[in-house]
Image (cartoon, grey):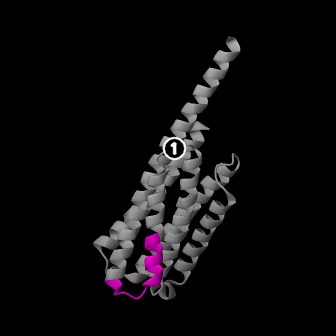
């Protein structure tokens, strides 16, 4: 179990770093080639979706993730494939696509927040704030897709940076919640054993 949790943390960390890296590129070079951007975006979606799908499949065996999370990651992979196949069509839709991805990610973060709350952590509201901000950024990009290209790329970059950083924060909060849950289980087991001995 410990090995699996560590593997999950590592995979989630990699996904967050990829998101941060892509966001940094867009912030630093907002006028970058759109076609190259599409290929990078498609590859990032496929990689992030693939990594998280593997985690979900493994976690499903112990009931750690729901089928909803698996479905969302399959959608991310299919979206990434489409972006790579139709870069010209996608270019004009990049803000909407990123917005949809952030909406999906925000929904997944909300589910993650509920898992943290059910684990008994008093800090679940921190994860909730990050999830709601991610959803808000997603809605903004979907509702305002026709801003100037460079401004749009800058906004998307900032959004991706935030999304990646918020994932890291969620991972830390989840790890803390898991630690507290394990601690309560150990204390309960110790008290039960002590009661039996008496």
Between residues 50 and 119, which one lies in front from this camera angle? 119
Using residue 2 as the reference point, say whether residue 147 is left or right of it: left
Q: Is 147 one of the magenta-colored residues?
A: yes
Where residue 178 sits: x, y (%)? Answer: 54, 41
Where residue 180 sits: x, y (%)? Answer: 52, 37
Position of 174 relative to 191 (above/below): below
Residue to which mark 1 is pinned = 121
Question: Which residue appears at 33% of the width and 76% of the height?
Answer: 154
Say which quarter of the image contains residue 17: bottom left
> Considering the numbered disc 1 on the image, is that residue within a helix, a strand or a loop?
loop
Q: How many marks?
A: 1
**10 Å neighbourhood of mark 1: few (<14), some, or many (≥20)?**
some
Query: Which segment did they paint magenta?
Result: 136-150
Between residues 76 and 46, which one lies in front from this camera angle? 76
Q: Is 153 one of the magenta-colored residues?
A: no
Q: Is residue 22 visible?
A: no
Residue at the left extreme, as displayed:
28
Question: Which residue appears at 51% of the width and 73% of the height?
Answer: 42
Q: Main secondary structure of the magenta part?
A: helix
Using residue 120 as the reference point, say whether residue 27 is left or right of it: left
Where residue 75 sits: x, y (%)? Answer: 61, 70
Position of 8 relative to 21 (above/below): above
Give the quarter of the figure containing the N terminus.
Answer: top right
Position of 18 relative to 27 (above/below): above
């Amino acid at each position: 179990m410990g090995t699996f949790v560590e593997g999950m943390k590592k995979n989630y960390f990699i996904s967050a770093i990829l998101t941060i890296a892509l966001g940094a590129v867009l912030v630093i070079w907002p006028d970058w080639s759109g076609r190259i951007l599409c290929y990078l975006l498609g590859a990032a979606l496929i990689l992030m979706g693939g990594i998280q799908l593997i985690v979900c499949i493994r976690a499903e065996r112990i009931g750690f993730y729901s089928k909803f999370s698996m479905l969302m990651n399959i959608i991310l992979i299919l979206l990434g494939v489409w972006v790579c196949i139709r870069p010209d069509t996608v270019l004009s839709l990049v803000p909407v696509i990123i917005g949809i991805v952030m909406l999906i990610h925000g929904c997944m973060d909300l589910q993650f927040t509920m898992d943290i709350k059910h684990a008994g952590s008093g800090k679940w509201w921190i994860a909730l704030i990050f999830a709601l901000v991610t959803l808000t950024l997603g809605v903004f990009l979907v509702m305002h897709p026709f801003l100037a290209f460079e401004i749009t790329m800058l906004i998307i970059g900032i959004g991706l940076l935030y999304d990646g950083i918020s994932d890291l924060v969620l991972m830390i909060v989840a790890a803390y919640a898991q630690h507290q849950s394990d601690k309560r289980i150990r204390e309960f087991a110790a008290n039960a054993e002590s009661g039996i001995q008496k």
